[in-house]
Amino acid sequence: MTVTEDRPSYKWVGTRPIRHDGYDKVVGKARFAADLNLPGQLHAAILRSPHGHARILSIDTSTAEAMPGVKAVVTAADFPALDVGNPEHDVAMNLMARDVVLYVGHALAAVAASTRAEAQAAAAAIEVEYELLPVVLSLDESMADGAPLVNDDNRTAFSGSDEPSNLATVTPLERGDVDGAFEAADLIVEREFDTAWVHQGYIEPHACVVDVGADGKADIWASSQGHFRVRSQTAAVLGWDTARVKVTPAEIGGGFGGKTTIYLEPVAARLSEKSGRPVKITMSRDEVLRATGPAPASKARIRIAATNDGELTAIDGWIGYAVGCTNDMAGFIGAMSVASYRFPNLKLEAVAALTNTPKSAAYRAPSAPQAAFAIESVIDEIAQLLEMDPIDLRLKNAVVEGDPTAMGSPHPRIGFVECLEAIRDSDHYRSPVPEGTARGVGSGFWFNIGEQSSATVNLNEDGTATVITGSPDIGGSRASMALMAAEELGIDVYRITPVVADTESVGFTDVTEGSRATFATGMAVVNACRELIDQLKTRAATILGVEADAVDWVDGAAVAEDKDPLPLADITAKAKSTGGPLTVTASLNAGGAGPSFAVHCCDVAVDEETGQVTVLRYTTAQDAGTAIHPSYVEGQMQGGTAQGIGWALNEEYVYDDDGTMLNASFLDYRVPVASDLPMIETIIVEVPNPAHPYGVRGVGETGIVPPMATIANAVSRATGARLTSLPMSPPKVLAVLDDR
Amino acid sequence: MPRAHLMTPHRRFTGGEGVIEVDGATVGAMIAELDRRFPGLGEMLTKGASAAVDGLIHAEPEYLAVDPDADVYFVAPLTGG
């Protein structure tokens, strides 16, 4: 179901063709990084720290080097020591510990051998002497007076201080008269919240194959959200020129923000360089959970003031993010995510603090879900206390174009009100709440970003086209690029082949994050097509014997007065005689990414004997701007929701006192499976982004922001007690039920 | 003259002032002038901010032209997943 506002009609945009890469993925022919094998290839294993924090006194690799099949061993000594100020310092430190290990799972050494078993055996034979250091595992411990330093290299960003600190960022935001607003309030609700570390849970573990040739150049095949970033980070960590590294993007089996950085490639490259053989590294699930970035755990205190008629007059809050072992901007970004309501008076502080846990990473809309869980829960409680419909309360306070974000800048045209109205008018919300269940509502928001993209469009001699981009296809972007090109050129979408090219075959393209690929890379495709059409019109004018400005481009053909239309294929067939190949490359740094809002609604049942929460019905409405391929927009909405349900009900890292994760497998770290979920109903709202030629906003991130609050609000209404701690696992729900 | 709108973390350099008129034909020129008047602010605006001009957020906007009556909002350097 789609709700469309002010949107032109298109021939191809908004249709649902089978994705160009679909057949290969369905029959198993698509090649992911772990599928690739090269002649003479070695397999690598990584030795990881068993301690949460320790000084490395010595590493003895001599026994490992003499073991059967072993061809190369590396430690931090095989990599240049980057200055603390180097932008990739933390990436390098995380790839291979130097002097100190900062979390259980931190890489210490790697071995390349003829078989994986030989590599694993040799890695286990490496002898390491440690001096144990205090382990810091929580926000409270990290921020306590006199807390041990997690990472001596950390400085609080933008503080002006050069003193080591556990604080990564401290971000205050203020406007208006908060104290006065609370004094004048009719109603004040204040709550404290906490959320656990959660992993993105992508199905495909990190993997790469690297072959360093005799010329010293590295060929890398890797799964990532941005192979140009793999190239730049790998080169930086190795101390190489970028031109020594070529990265070919493998298909990606899920990323969700977790594959925007590297963990393996420089290690494989150095092993390949030392051994003279290609080297493959594939993480196990245990390694993925212990050594790659989860989303930060958080704590929050939120206080909101309201009038009796439901006007939200002030918010006063603090939110802290535990970001793992290195500096992270989670707190800085999290502070910005309070942007859905006008709040004339606002005082927030967001803090990010270090812990002896893996370096955290983005998870769809980074830092926003934790903040939204807290704020949307308090707003729901206000609606309950005022006996207002929760959507009416939100409509009364929702931001519209021109209202300030938390950063102060005015919102551009946005579709929050339209999303609220879409849920309010949905079959789900208009249906009675079933007996024995309760209903919750929540909302969320993400800015989205633009950044740099390139696209090359080649017209072939028979009138088909190749669209080449540098954005890995993590959510159906090949189909979206082909649809926009088909709309521009006026040819069938299946006469277009979308290609994701390696770093030497397409212009620089930033990593696929911030829901930017269809927005920014799509804009590059559109620009390239429009320049091609100008060329086609000029070629057509030559063929038709008219002036170039007498030619229009209509539905895939050149049209001139008193001439028969000249289809694209008739022009490309004469390319050689009219000036040569028809090809255009467009590059840009896209500004004007359009914020996307979502509103969710769910019905839950709570088993009062076991504490189990079952989600019975779930509907999501989200502003896509324009849905280029609605099926993949719906897929993003459903995927974000499914992951959010896991975040809400089941998922959490469980650590022992030494920082060892106790549930590092999908048996014990329980993500939702199909049988846990209802069919997630979707309503695509289309309020076009005026800064994009087709109105695209980007849809990949917002979907994970509302689910935790939406479910918590439903569970709280079902139980009569406010749930403030994630996950709402059966023991926690039972404890809340017992305390009623 | 263009107006620079600063987020709360930037205002420790300006004595709490949130909106400052500052001459400059580009965002970069505005940042340079702000740094001259408020030493240290330039680095934070360069490394720790994007800019919203005419409602559009731009990353690394150093050479982005601004009109004489423009409102330039320095906002967080947004990323994503």
Image (spheres, coloured by chain):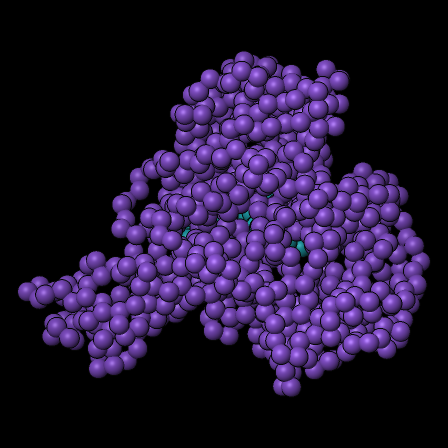
Chain colours: A purple, B cyan
> What residue appears at the point 33 percent right and 37 percent down from the top-left corner?
A5
Q: Name the residue rendered at 66%, 51% in the picture.
A: A361
Closer to the camera in the image, A29 or A595: A29
- Locate residue A384, reporting x and y percent: 57, 16
Task: Identify which residue, A549 or A642, lies in the foreground.
Answer: A642
Q: Quadrant of the C terminus of chain A?
A: top right
- Image coords of residue A391 (percent x, y): 48, 23
Give the vertical position of A90 relative to A685 (above or below): below
Asked whether the viewer can see residue A169, the reply is no
Q: Is residue A593 left or right of residue B19?
A: left
The residue located at (78%, 76%) in the rendering is A69
Q: Position of residue A601 (x, y in %)?
A: 51, 28
Residue most extreme to the front: A27
Above or below A38: residue B42: above
Answer yes or no: is residue A64 visible. yes
- Nearer-the-camera pick, A480 or A89: A480
Q: Residue furthest bottom?
A: A214
